[in-house]
Image (cartoon, rainbow, N blue to C red):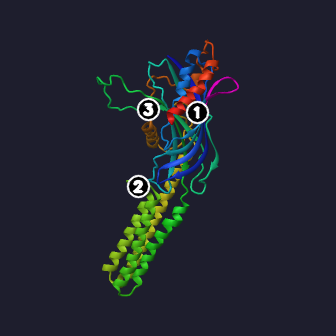
Amino acid sequence: MRVYYFGVRVNWDKLLAIDQQKESFKAQIFVEATLLHPQKVRECDEKDVLKFFTRATVENSLAKPKDDEFPTQDDKKNWRFVWLIHGEFGEELELQNFPFDTQDLSVMLRFGWPCKDRKEVQVRFVDSRKSKVFVNIFCLKNAWTEPKAVDVRFGFTKIDEHWKPTPEEPEIPDQFPLIWIRCQVGRKPKFYLLNVVLPVASIVFASISSLAVFEDMGGRLGATLTLLLTAVAYKYLVAEMVPRISYNTLLDWYVLICWAFLLLMVLGNCFVHHDAKTAVGFTFGALFAFFNAVFAVVCLRMHRVERQRLEISDDHGDHGEPLLGATSSDEENEALVLYYNDDFNTQDPQNLTRTLEEVKALPKETCNGGSMSPSSVSTAGSYASEWQRHRM
């Protein structure tokens, strides 16, 4: 078996939109894979290497992406493949800390060449450590922070951990190479603080004024219930800001607790004697002020933790790649590793993965070749055309 190692470089060129309701984003990404020295591609392997790269798909694309996936050569006659991928991509948003959340935006490339010993030619990817965010167009500056770095990881498609050989399927299912590209953006919460938190807090404080209605329970209840219904309307407003998820966001909890305070005021109007209204009003106001102080502390902590995820870590991964999402504890680091493993299998089924230093230390191939032979150059376009017809 012959293995060829390609260094991967990624530029994140454009970030055009993030659709929270559809849980998707629109972006453009440039991907380059170049054969690493001192390797050279044998002439007998050229067609297989071309097939490997022309069988690429974007796993999380919501529609057929517009991409240019044709093998090209640079001036030094090195093997070099380039993708310019732009389209709309699905991304599961994590909204527990909304509106102080940080979101991962990722694109996953899958290559339809199985990692099996029956294949005499295998290709593995190595991070060239030259990837960067170079955003030419960023249309979300008013709502999101601009990404600072791009994280490139390599893995393989997952198989069922409970798989067992059967007469119909005696061999383990095929696994295919993956390239996982990720950047992070942080939400700017000012809009939600001014348009949701501040009005809802004002409504709760305004409910104290219902105690000033002298000995008229109906008038007090009417005023408080009106404010209560207004708070319910804000809950629906918050629900429209996020997709239909099965958990409450931080902003949801704030509105719900404010609704509970208004409900307490309704009960107070029913059972509190007029002589005790001053004490009740001060107690209610003090409790709600304390709740808002606690909420402010929680928000500041959430904002700090989420912004730490946007910083580039001083550490590096197992293969020397820079890491996004710096964490502050061993437990959080362990959770980060589990997060990566949920998306794909990091274990090479053939144990062929190498670091950049290990690849550069490989003995120089003595066989002829390195640049594409004339026959392979002529077939490169036909493979690309065949791949395009397959995608249609």
Give the amino acid at mark 1: Glu
Disc 1 and disc 3: Cα gap in Å?
21 Å
* Number of marks: 3
Give how far apart the Cα atoms at labels 2 and 3 are.
29 Å
Q: Nearer the viewer, mark 1 or mark 3?
A: 1
Q: Which residue appears at 57% of the width and 29% of the height?
A: 384
Q: Amino acid at mark 2?
A: Arg
Q: Nearer the viewer, residue 239 or 224?
A: 239
Q: Main secondary structure of the magenta part?
A: strand
Q: Is residue 78 magenta?
A: yes
Which residue corresponds to mark 3? 157
Looking at the image, residue 34 lies above or below residue 42: below
Left or right, residue 265 beside residue 153: left
Which comes before the other along the chain, label 1 or label 2? Answer: 1
Q: Residue furthest right?
A: 75
Q: Residue at position x 41%, y 55% from top? A: 244
Other residues around mark 1 within 10 Å, as few (<14) / some (14–19) / many (≥20) = many
Q: Is residue 278 visible?
A: no
Q: State left or right for residue 250 relative to residue 215.
A: right
- For label 1, the residue is 69
Nearer to us of marks 1 and 2 is 1
Task: Tell me the quarter of the picture where residue 66 sits.
Answer: top right
Whether 45 is drawn above or below 276: the answer is above
Q: Where is residue 172 drawn, in percent x and y?
A: 37, 25
Kind of element beneath mark 2: loop
User: What secondary structure is marked by label 3?
Assistant: loop
Was residue 353 drawn as part of the magenta stretch in this picture? no
* Residue wearing tag 2: 244
Magenta stretch bounds: 71-83
